[in-house]
Amino acid sequence: MGDARVHRDRRALVVPVDGTLPPVCVLTGDPTDHVERHSIEVAPRLVRWLAACLMHHDLQEWFTKKVDLDLPLGDGVPALRRRRRAKARLSLAIGFAAIGAFLFGDLESWRWLGLMPFVAIVAIAFGAGLALQPLPLPYGTRVRDGHVWLRGVHEGALDGLPAWRGTAARDAA
Protein backbone atom coordinates (compact mmCIF):
# COMPACT_ATOMS: atom_id res chain seq x y z
CA MET A 1 0.00 0.00 0.00
CA GLY A 2 1.12 3.58 -0.52
CA ASP A 3 2.71 5.79 2.08
CA ALA A 4 0.39 8.13 4.01
CA ARG A 5 2.97 10.88 3.56
CA VAL A 6 2.56 11.03 -0.24
CA HIS A 7 0.85 14.25 -1.37
CA ARG A 8 0.13 16.23 -4.51
CA ASP A 9 1.29 19.79 -5.09
CA ARG A 10 -0.76 20.98 -8.07
CA ARG A 11 0.49 18.70 -10.88
CA ALA A 12 3.48 17.36 -8.93
CA LEU A 13 3.69 14.30 -6.73
CA VAL A 14 5.39 14.96 -3.37
CA VAL A 15 7.05 11.80 -2.06
CA PRO A 16 9.26 11.28 0.99
CA VAL A 17 12.71 10.10 -0.04
CA ASP A 18 12.20 6.90 1.97
CA GLY A 19 8.47 6.57 1.17
CA THR A 20 6.52 4.26 -1.11
CA LEU A 21 4.11 5.35 -3.80
CA PRO A 22 0.49 4.19 -4.01
CA PRO A 23 -0.08 1.13 -6.26
CA VAL A 24 -1.07 3.26 -9.27
CA CYS A 25 1.07 3.40 -12.43
CA VAL A 26 2.81 6.79 -12.68
CA LEU A 27 2.64 6.72 -16.52
CA THR A 28 -0.87 5.40 -17.24
CA GLY A 29 -2.80 5.92 -13.99
CA ASP A 30 -3.92 2.25 -13.90
CA PRO A 31 -3.81 0.14 -10.71
CA THR A 32 -0.71 -2.05 -10.55
CA ASP A 33 1.40 -4.23 -8.29
CA HIS A 34 4.57 -4.06 -10.43
CA VAL A 35 7.29 -1.79 -9.03
CA GLU A 36 10.63 -0.86 -10.64
CA ARG A 37 13.50 0.91 -8.90
CA HIS A 38 14.66 4.02 -10.76
CA SER A 39 17.23 6.68 -10.03
CA ILE A 40 15.56 10.08 -10.35
CA GLU A 41 17.80 13.05 -11.09
CA VAL A 42 16.65 16.29 -9.54
CA ALA A 43 18.02 19.55 -10.93
CA PRO A 44 16.57 23.06 -10.72
CA ARG A 45 14.79 24.22 -13.89
CA LEU A 46 17.18 27.11 -14.49
CA VAL A 47 20.19 24.79 -14.29
CA ARG A 48 18.56 22.29 -16.71
CA TRP A 49 17.75 25.12 -19.12
CA LEU A 50 21.25 26.65 -18.94
CA ALA A 51 22.89 23.25 -19.37
CA ALA A 52 20.75 22.56 -22.45
CA CYS A 53 21.42 26.00 -23.98
CA LEU A 54 25.14 25.94 -23.32
CA MET A 55 25.42 22.19 -24.05
CA HIS A 56 27.42 21.94 -20.83
CA HIS A 57 26.23 18.78 -19.10
CA ASP A 58 28.85 19.06 -16.36
CA LEU A 59 26.99 22.17 -15.17
CA GLN A 60 23.87 20.09 -14.61
CA GLU A 61 25.83 17.30 -12.90
CA TRP A 62 27.27 19.74 -10.39
CA PHE A 63 23.82 20.83 -9.22
CA THR A 64 21.98 17.52 -9.61
CA LYS A 65 20.89 15.30 -6.74
CA LYS A 66 20.02 11.65 -7.33
CA VAL A 67 17.20 9.94 -5.47
CA ASP A 68 16.37 6.23 -5.79
CA LEU A 69 12.62 5.56 -5.78
CA ASP A 70 10.42 2.53 -6.39
CA LEU A 71 8.07 3.64 -9.18
CA PRO A 72 4.88 1.64 -9.80
CA LEU A 73 4.62 0.84 -13.51
CA GLY A 74 1.49 -0.86 -14.79
CA ASP A 75 0.70 -3.34 -17.52
CA GLY A 76 0.17 -0.49 -20.00
CA VAL A 77 3.85 0.51 -19.94
CA PRO A 78 5.04 -2.37 -22.18
CA ALA A 79 2.29 -1.38 -24.64
CA LEU A 80 3.61 2.20 -24.60
CA ARG A 81 7.10 0.89 -25.31
CA ARG A 82 5.81 -1.34 -28.15
CA ARG A 83 3.96 1.61 -29.74
CA ARG A 84 7.08 3.74 -29.52
CA ARG A 85 9.18 1.01 -31.18
CA ALA A 86 6.53 0.55 -33.89
CA LYS A 87 6.56 4.29 -34.64
CA ALA A 88 10.36 4.24 -34.82
CA ARG A 89 10.34 1.27 -37.21
CA LEU A 90 7.68 2.88 -39.40
CA SER A 91 9.66 6.09 -39.61
CA LEU A 92 12.86 4.20 -40.47
CA ALA A 93 10.99 2.21 -43.14
CA ILE A 94 9.66 5.43 -44.69
CA GLY A 95 13.19 6.85 -44.72
CA PHE A 96 14.69 3.81 -46.42
CA ALA A 97 11.77 3.63 -48.88
CA ALA A 98 12.46 7.27 -49.77
CA ILE A 99 16.10 6.39 -50.45
CA GLY A 100 15.00 3.50 -52.66
CA ALA A 101 12.52 5.70 -54.53
CA PHE A 102 15.27 8.26 -55.15
CA LEU A 103 17.82 5.69 -56.32
CA PHE A 104 15.56 3.57 -58.50
CA GLY A 105 12.84 6.02 -59.56
CA ASP A 106 12.59 7.84 -62.87
CA LEU A 107 13.79 11.34 -61.94
CA GLU A 108 13.10 12.83 -65.38
CA SER A 109 9.38 12.06 -65.44
CA TRP A 110 8.75 12.50 -61.69
CA ARG A 111 10.71 15.56 -60.61
CA TRP A 112 9.39 15.45 -57.04
CA LEU A 113 11.58 12.37 -56.44
CA GLY A 114 14.44 14.84 -56.05
CA LEU A 115 13.01 15.68 -52.62
CA MET A 116 13.37 12.10 -51.39
CA PRO A 117 16.86 12.52 -49.86
CA PHE A 118 15.48 15.25 -47.59
CA VAL A 119 12.45 13.12 -46.67
CA ALA A 120 14.81 10.22 -45.94
CA ILE A 121 17.06 12.29 -43.69
CA VAL A 122 14.14 13.63 -41.66
CA ALA A 123 12.39 10.26 -41.37
CA ILE A 124 15.54 8.37 -40.41
CA ALA A 125 16.57 11.02 -37.88
CA PHE A 126 13.08 10.97 -36.33
CA GLY A 127 13.01 7.17 -36.20
CA ALA A 128 16.48 6.94 -34.71
CA GLY A 129 15.58 9.54 -32.11
CA LEU A 130 12.48 7.61 -31.10
CA ALA A 131 14.37 4.33 -30.98
CA LEU A 132 17.25 5.67 -28.90
CA GLN A 133 15.26 7.79 -26.45
CA PRO A 134 13.92 5.85 -23.46
CA LEU A 135 10.31 6.05 -22.36
CA PRO A 136 9.90 9.30 -20.42
CA LEU A 137 9.60 8.68 -16.69
CA PRO A 138 8.58 11.22 -14.08
CA TYR A 139 11.37 13.67 -13.35
CA GLY A 140 12.31 15.43 -10.15
CA THR A 141 12.09 19.18 -9.86
CA ARG A 142 12.95 19.76 -6.21
CA VAL A 143 14.30 18.02 -3.10
CA ARG A 144 13.46 19.74 0.16
CA ASP A 145 12.94 18.58 3.76
CA GLY A 146 13.35 14.93 2.81
CA HIS A 147 10.71 15.09 0.05
CA VAL A 148 11.01 14.86 -3.73
CA TRP A 149 8.69 16.70 -6.15
CA LEU A 150 8.00 14.57 -9.23
CA ARG A 151 6.55 16.04 -12.43
CA GLY A 152 5.34 14.12 -15.46
CA VAL A 153 3.08 11.89 -13.38
CA HIS A 154 -0.28 10.79 -14.85
CA GLU A 155 -3.35 12.55 -13.40
CA GLY A 156 -4.78 9.16 -12.39
CA ALA A 157 -1.83 8.68 -10.03
CA LEU A 158 -2.49 12.09 -8.46
CA ASP A 159 -6.26 11.62 -7.98
CA GLY A 160 -7.31 11.10 -4.39
CA LEU A 161 -4.04 12.28 -2.85
CA PRO A 162 -4.20 15.00 -0.20
CA ALA A 163 -2.89 18.44 -1.08
CA TRP A 164 0.59 19.36 0.08
CA ARG A 165 0.52 21.77 2.99
CA GLY A 166 4.22 22.07 3.67
CA THR A 167 5.98 20.80 6.76
CA ALA A 168 2.72 20.78 8.77
CA ALA A 169 1.42 17.94 6.59
CA ARG A 170 4.63 16.02 7.07
CA ASP A 171 4.57 16.44 10.85
CA ALA A 172 0.90 15.41 11.09
CA ALA A 173 1.54 12.08 9.32
Image: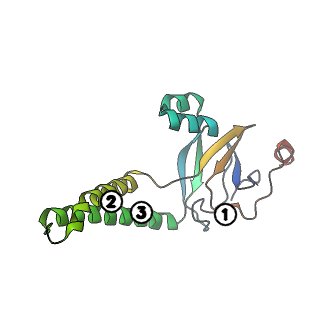
Instruction: Give residue 155's mark.
Output: 1
Rendered residue at 66%/51% (across/down): 20
Q: State the scheme by which the image is colored.
A: rainbow
Secondary element under disc 2, as helix, strand or loop, is helix
Distance from Cα at disc 2 to Cα at disc 1: 32 Å
Q: Is residue 4 left or right of residue 45?
A: right
Location of residue 43 by image quarter: top right
Distance from Cα at disc 2 to Cα at disc 3: 15 Å
Rendered residue at 52%/36% (across/down): 53
- Name the residue carrying label 2: 123
Sequence-wise, the earlier of marks 2 and 3 is 3
Residue type at numbered disc 2: Ala
Q: Are marks 2 and 3 in contact (CB under 8 Å)?
A: no
Tell me if residue 96 can be seen: no
Tell me if residue 120 can be seen: yes
Instruction: Give residue 84's mark.
Output: 3
Distance from Cα at disc 1 to Cα at disc 3: 21 Å
Residue type at numbered disc 1: Glu
Rendered residue at 58%/33% (across/down): 64
Q: Is residue 72 left or right of residue 5?
A: left
Rendered residue at 47%/34% (across/down): 55
Secondary element under disc 3, as helix, strand or loop, is helix
Q: Work out whether 96 lies above or below 134.
A: below
In the image, 89 versus 137, the foreground residue is: 89
Residue type at numbered disc 3: Arg
